[in-house]
Image (cartoon, rainbow, N blue to C red):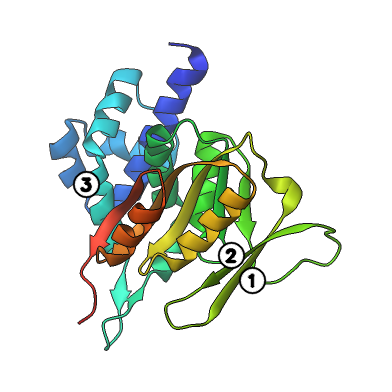
Amino acid sequence: MTREERLRIQMRAVQCLRAIKRGCTYQELSLLLGASPVVLNRYVKGHVLPGIERAERILEFCSRERLAEQVKQRLSFDEDGFVDNTALLFDTDLLAAVAELIAQRFPRANKVLTAAVDGIPPAVHIASALQVPCLFAKRSREIGVRSFVESRYKLASGQILNYFLPSQALGRRDRVLIVDDLLRSGETQAALMEIVNTQRATPVGVFSLIRIGDEGTRRLEQSVDCPVEALLTLDPIN
């Protein structure tokens, strides 16, 4: 293991600790991780890095399921049951911890693609973890950009969903991970997939922080040849 690889593992462990610390006390973490509260506090505050063995133990503790529970704790719901994920999208420590996990799941991606605007926070963190460019499609054309690839996707409601991406941003040699904050109907992700297909790039996966029900996932899986995943699944509103 190179020095850079060791340092990356240690930094990931600190990010995970910072993310889960908001949901429990240092004493509770101490019992779970076998390290004193004082030592854990020093890790979280950035005064010292954990040794490689302890860092690996911390990462094992910060499983996909535990991070999903942290995501759920950041959500709130209005009186009609609609989800508000503002606190989640503002939590850079948690998004960074999730990003490292997803980067390991899709290591072949050399581009991350999302839709403006709520998809940008998780996509930027995942692209950073992968050390690749982050692209985001917009609902309107940017002044000064000469050439765009356009997705015109017809929604179930009959409306047309338009997204634009500078055409030079994506090419046939690219392996693309599509990222979004929320997957409900799957229509936004399908519109992004149309951009990928138009540019003859290769989709390697579709990832969302939150999935509402399974209908959107099933619809996407019928039309794409790559994994469709979410960290947390919530029941749809009746």
User: Which of the two discs, 3 and 2, sits closer to the camera?
Assistant: 2
Residue furthest to the left in view is: 31
| Nearer to me, 192 or 46 | 192
Characterize the local packing of mark 2: few (<14), some (14-19) or many (20 or more) Cα atoms within 10 angstroms. some
Real-space CA distance between mark 1 and mark 3, rounded to the nearest whole angstrom: 34 Å
Residue 215 coordinates in the image, percent (x, y): 28, 66
Task: Name the mark nearer the viewer: 1 or 3.
Answer: 1
Q: Which residue is mark 1?
A: 139
Of 91 and 139, which appears nearest the observer? 139
Q: Earlier in the sequence, mark 1 or mark 3?
A: 3
Label 2 sits on residue: 116
Would you identify the image quadrant in which residue 35 lies?
A: top left
Residue 51 left/right relative to 193: left
Horizontal side of residue 157 vs 25, given as left or right: right
Q: Quadrant of residue 146?
A: bottom right
Residues under labels 2 and 1: Cα distance? 8 Å
The amino acid at mark 2 is Ala
Q: Are marks 2 and 1 in contact (CB under 8 Å)?
A: yes
Residue at x 46%, y 27% (from the top left corner): 8
Label 2 secondary element: loop
Taking the spot 48% from the left edge, 65% from the top edge, the residue there is 188
**Residues marked 3 and 2 touching at CB (< 8 Å):** no
The percent coordinates of residue 68 (x first, y second) are: 26, 52
- Please identify the quadrant where the C terminus is shown: bottom left
Q: Is residue 48 visible?
A: no
Q: Which residue is mark 3?
A: 65
What type is the residue that disc 1 sits on? Answer: Arg
SS label for mark 1: loop
- The residue shown at (31%, 80%) is 82
Specify whether residue 169 is in view: yes
